[in-house]
Structures are given as C-alpha cells and as structure tokens.
Amino acid sequence: MGTYKRKIRILLYTVFVCATFDYCFGQDSIEFTHVNQLIATRDSAVNARFTEDMDYFLKSGRASILLSNSDYYRRLRPYSKEIRDRLFPCYKKCKGSEKNRRVLGLLDLPQYMKDSLLNYKYTELEVRAGLGDTIAQQAIIKTYRNFLTLDIKTDKDLNEELYRKKLPQALLVYMGSEEAIKIFLEGLNSTDIFEDTYDQEPYNKISLFYYLLGSYSAFIADTPSIMSQFYLQKFLYTEEGGLGEDYQEWLRELERYFEDRHGIKLNIKAPFLIQGYEYIIEH
C-alpha cells in the first residue's frame, strides 16, 4: 500500500503562484514565517526553471515551452525583443504558428506586428483582445459572464467551459486591465460546487471559487501569501461542516484585499474549497 499526494487538478491553470507581496493579515507570525519560507524556496525553483526554459527556447525556437507554465506568462515581457524576433517571421502558416501568436500576444510589439496579427483572420480571440480589438474583448467578457451562469457539474465541464476557452488568461493576462480583472473577480462570489471525477468514487466536491482564486493567483503578480498553496493546505480536504471561524476570517481578509487592490467589493460565500479526502490507493 502506498500513499499518493492527490494532484489538485488535472488543469494546468489552477496552479497557485506564490507571493512576494507582504500584506498585514493578523494571522500567526510563526505560521506566516514558515509559509513565506516555502514560497521563497518555490520561487527560487521557478526562476531557475524559467531560465533553463528560456535558454531552450532561444536555441530551439519552440514557443510551446514558454506557454508550459502559468508562472511564465507575466515573465516574458522583459524578453520581448529576443522572443518576437524569433517568432514573428512565423506567426502564420508555420508549424506551431498558433503558439507563436499566443506568445507574441504577451509581449511588447511594434505597431506593424500588432497590425499584422490583427489583420490575420486566424489570430486567436484572446490575442486580439490583448491587442485592443474591442469586439474580441466584448466577446470574451460575454463568454465569461455566461460561464458564471452555467450548471458546472464536473471538472470536465469546467475544463470545457473555462480553461479550453482560455478565459482566465484572456481576462487576467492578455487584456489585463483593471476592468477585465474586476470582471473576472465577479466569479469569486460564486457558491457553485462541482465534482472532481479525476479519481475514484466517492468524488470530492470542489468549489468554483477555489479554482477561480487559483487562476487569479497564477496570473497576477504580487499576490499575498494567504493565496499560496502552502497557506491553503489548512482548508483543503475538509469534512462536511469541518470549517470554522478561521476559514470565515480568511474569506473576509480576501474581500479586504480585493477591495484595497482592485476597488471591488466582493461577498465571498464559498462553503469550502475541497470537501472530501486524499485517497489511499492500493496497488
């Protein structure tokens, strides 16, 4: 018999990015010291991996490596010239052109490159939105708000309706305006629950809030340590009715953070993050 740490999600974009932003939350200082140490270790590892992957890209020209980790999305802009000079000659009609365009949309581009991408009919919606196409922007906003009205029953539904359509990246990174971020944050008020069918029954129940918070943390810089996966461990895999005052206070702290940073008042009522258990798998 072996114990396997449950992989909290098959979806790439739910990975939580750790924080370097210090925010005053009145929690136990010893606990936060430990969390921040874990964050620093993780950030160091991500930085090292990013350097390796950037070197690989410069040698190979394969844009897919730059999209392989949600941590990388906001790290590419300082390398705009090196990357765009390599990718722009092949933004269409080449193997991997779609990924080339998605990376180009994350960079500082001269106007002629922007115009070329906007004039190419196959350029992806989120790239168009990031380049200022208002029709694309409104289409993404409409799709996201419609998503929030859907009856999401399983993780497969979530993947199909949110992640395959790249809505978090579109709103938080490619568009990335305060208006777009606020629209994305509207989803944190959701109390919707879905089942994780990745493992065996009985399926764990997961709040949509948990996934959307993860996307925000993954794509927005300088998020507080109370959003890191290290801090959230204390609230994961709860039994029904197993969360108490600490959880409610954490939700209130998040509301204060979002109001201070983005000027949006939220009313977060997610009943839990994950309700269920880590599995013991016999083999």
Image (tube, helix red, strand yellow):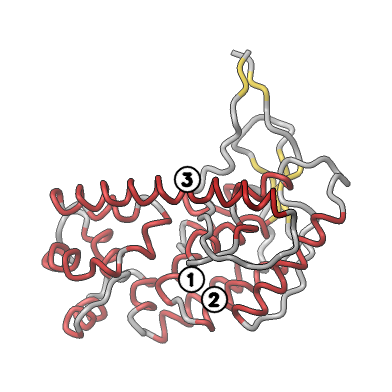
Mark 3–mark 1 Cα distance, whole angstroms, equals 25 Å
Q: Position of residue 190 (x, y in %)?
A: 72, 65
- Picture disc at residue 181: 2
Q: Is residue 8 left or right of residue 56?
A: right
> In the image, what residue occupies the spot 74% across and 33% down?
202
Which of disc 3 and disc 2 is earlier in sequence? 3
- What amino acid is found at the position of numbered circle 2 in the picture? Ile
Task: Say whether marks 2 and 3 touch (CB < 8 Å).
Answer: no
265, 89: nearer the viewer: 265
Q: Nearer the viewer, mark 3 or mark 1?
A: 3
- Badge 2 local density, few (<14 within 10 Å), some, or many (20+)? many
* Residue underneath mark 3: 41
For mark 3, give the secondary structure: helix
Where, quadrant-wise, is the C terminus in this rendering?
Answer: top right
Q: Position of residue 227 (x, y in %)?
A: 62, 58
Q: Work out whether 22 lies above or below 63.
A: below
Q: Work out whether 55 lies above or below 186.
A: above
221, 62: nearer the viewer: 221
* Residue underneath mark 1: 172
Which of disc 1 and disc 3 is earlier in sequence? 3
Mark 1–mark 2 Cα distance, whole angstroms, equals 6 Å
Where, quadrant-wise, is the N terminus in this rendering?
Answer: top right
Task: Say whether marks 1 and 2 touch (CB < 8 Å).
Answer: yes
